[in-house]
Image (cartoon, rainbow, N blue to C red):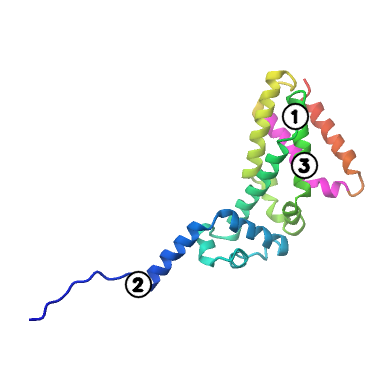
């Protein structure tokens, strides 16, 4: 009599490959993919950067990138948040020895404007793909802008407490300062074509000082 043996089907090649791909994606840090994206954007701009090229630069499979980021725009958003928030964190270290919160805010804002306007990624976006920056000026605030506004909010509240900053509704005050700071950051390079950068930034500090002084 023949006896039928029941066996558990083994995972097929596609299932095994899919599992390996998930494991590989889990092992690759986001920074590896974002570093690769940064290299691609600096080399050819955003519009010519593809997920396949990011994968090649990062030396991972395309599926590894696809599982983490669905498209180039999502990679770029994550990259800008990492890069520009990092620059602003570094700028926030300025003014540690300031006499009061108003002086600290002005020093940090000036350092932030300098850092952003000189950053290679920020300059590439403005020079090669300015239309990608436009929505953050005329449509909505991005994650980096909200991060900067939160830092300003804290500095303004500290200035209200120590008496160095004019009291005003802090939400409106921080938003107004943000708009002044970002206008200088976006326009510093063309604005210094026929005006000295040092002189222009000196005026920037006077604008903030005058607006915030009690």
In the foreground, 154 or 193: 154
Neighbor class of circle 2 (other Cα within 10 Å; few <14, some 14-19, many 20+) is few
Mark closer to the chain start, 3 or 1: 1
Q: Is residue 141 visible?
A: no
How far apart are the alpha carbons under marks 2 and 1?
Answer: 62 Å
* Quadrant position of residue 106: top right
* Quadrant position of residue 76: bottom right
Which residue position holds label 2?
Answer: 12
First to last magenta residue range: 172-192
Mark 3: which secondary structure? Answer: helix
In the foreground, 170 or 88: 88
Q: Is residue 192 visible?
A: yes
Q: Residue at x 59, y 57 (%)?
A: 32
Q: Nearer the viewer, mark 2 or mark 3?
A: 2
Left or right: 182 with respect to 69?
right
The spot of residue 121 in percent (x, y) is: 72, 54
The spot of residue 193 in percent (x, y) is: 89, 49
In the rendered image, the quadrant that contains the N terminus is bottom left
Q: Main secondary structure of the magenta part?
A: helix
Which residue position holds label 1?
Answer: 104
* Image position of 206 with respect to 141: above or below: above
């Amino acid at each position: 009599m023949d006896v039928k043996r029941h066996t558990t089907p083994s995972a097929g090649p596609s299932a095994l490959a899919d599992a390996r791909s998930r494991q590989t994606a889990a092992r690759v840090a986001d920074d590896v993919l974002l570093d690769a994206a940064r290299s691609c954007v600096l080399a050819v701009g955003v519009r010519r950067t593809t997920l396949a090229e990011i994968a090649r630069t990062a030396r991972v499979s395309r599926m590894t990138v696809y599982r983490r980021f669905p498209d180039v725009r999502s990679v770029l958003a994550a990259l800008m948040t990492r890069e520009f928030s990092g620059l602003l964190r570094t700028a926030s270290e300025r003014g540690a020895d300031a006499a009061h919160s108003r002086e600290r805010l002005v020093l940090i804002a000036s350092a932030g404007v300098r850092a952003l306007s000189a950053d290679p990624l920020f300059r590439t976006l403005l020079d090669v793909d300015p239309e990608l920056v436009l929505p953050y000026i005329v449509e909505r605030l991005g994650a980096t802008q909200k991060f900067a506004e939160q830092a300003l909010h804290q500095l303004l509240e500290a200035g209200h407490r120590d008496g160095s900053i004019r009291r005003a509704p802090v939400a409106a005050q921080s938003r107004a300062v943000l708009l002044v700071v970002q206008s200088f950051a976006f326009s510093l390079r063309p604005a210094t074509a026929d005006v000295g950068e040092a002189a222009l930034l000196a005026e920037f500090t006077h604008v903030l000082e005058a607006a915030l002084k009690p």
